[in-house]
Amino acid sequence: MMEMFDVLVVGGGPVGACAAALLARGGTASPLKVAVLEPHRPQMPAADAAIDPRVVAVSRASERILEAAGAWAGVRRLSPYERMRIWHESVPAISPGSLVFDAADVGEPNLGYIVENRVLQAALLESFAAAGGHIEPAHFVGLQIGAEAVTVATSGGSLSARLVIGADGAQSAVRQAVGLTVDSSDYRQTAIVATVATERSHEKTAWQRFMRNGTLAFLPLADGTSSIVWSADQDLAKVLLEGSSADFEAELDRASDRALGRTRLVSDRASFLLRRLAAHHYAARRVALIGDAAHVVHPLAGQGVNLGLLDAAVLAELLLEARREREDPGALRVLRHYERWRKSEVAFMSSAIDTFDRFLAHGRGPLSRLARKGLGWVNRSHELKRFFVSRALGTAGELPRIARRAAR
């Protein structure tokens, strides 16, 4: 007989694993029976393993969500950052025209953490499994939605669930299987990621430079190195990826204006094309989308995973409330509530990020000149800086309960 779950999460990346862990640890008298479909479960890297260049920035709201999911204590090699320095290529990094956010100015211990993606994923899946969750090591093949449940075909057999959560990324097979459509556009940029050593200390600071052909960020890592995210126009990206390590380092020194001195590659370069994606609907009958399956934003603000973790927290909160009311977890009323809540919040952040990319990284003309001057204006306004910091920390907007409360 086919095993029946209350919730089946397709995709065990950080966002899907977080939703599953929150649901499994919901603490109700009648806990939900949850499974995750994940064919490639990562192992927690050894303490002395090289830091992977694929990292994410974790906000304060996300820290609280991860704590509620039982995973925060298991996240290793955290690198808290205390400041952000943002500047345009038309001014030096250290100048009145640059914008600096400092945790001390807003009474916070830090502005967030830089964490390896694989560490975050491994910690969340470990927490989910420890809570009694089931991890199915198989690939998604297809699904069939019935009146009472969804039958999911996998490479290892079939599973049944009252609700399927699609957390399987921008090319979501779940989204395509249920016919949910998207708006998608090409940024005509490629993001290049790598780990670099720098001549000068990163000073627990995230550095970001806007240029006419892209955006370059240095993210501080726990071992003193930095992870770079270089969102470059495609013609430039092709040259950067095809050149030698020495050529890349020379171009990196030029693009960073040597804000941290000379740079040296300590990892391979990886890259991915940048696209914007927004699903028209986040929910259908007995199916909900979270994370990149529902929305993809430009990486310049480091908000992609944080938006996804908020999706997971909101959906988990609503599903657990429905459980307490003895309501079907696949009820469309519950899923539409989730969609309305998250769609407006994501749209606000996505629009803000696209505005930064348009006018600071690629803009020309009077509006772009005004935007560049705006960095210095914001830097001189305590109230404006507090507003932007609260958004970066994820502590503004309509938040789920676990993201609002103080971390223990």
Image (spheres, grey):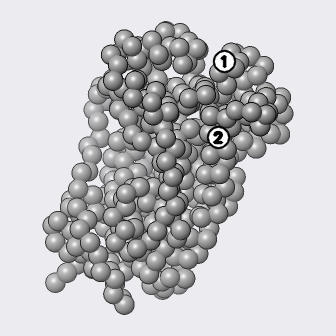
Q: Relative to 250, is 372 above or below?
A: below
Residue that mark 2 sits on = 358
Residue 254 appears at what percent x and percent y? 53, 14
- Secondary structure beneath dot 2 equals helix
Kind of residue sitting beneath label 1: Ala
Q: Nearer the viewer, residue 110 or 93?
A: 93
Residue 161 appears at what percent x and percent y? 32, 78
Q: Is residue 104 left or right of residue 378?
A: left
Q: Relative to 374, is 32 above or below?
A: below
Which quadrant holds residue 9? bottom left
Kind of residue sitting beneath label 2: Arg
- Secondary structure beneath dot 1 equals loop
Nearer the observer: mark 2 or 1; the answer is 2
| Total numbered labels | 2
Which quadrant holds residue 54? top left
- At 53% from the left edge and 36% from the top edge, which residue is drawn? 113
Residue that mark 1 sits on = 93
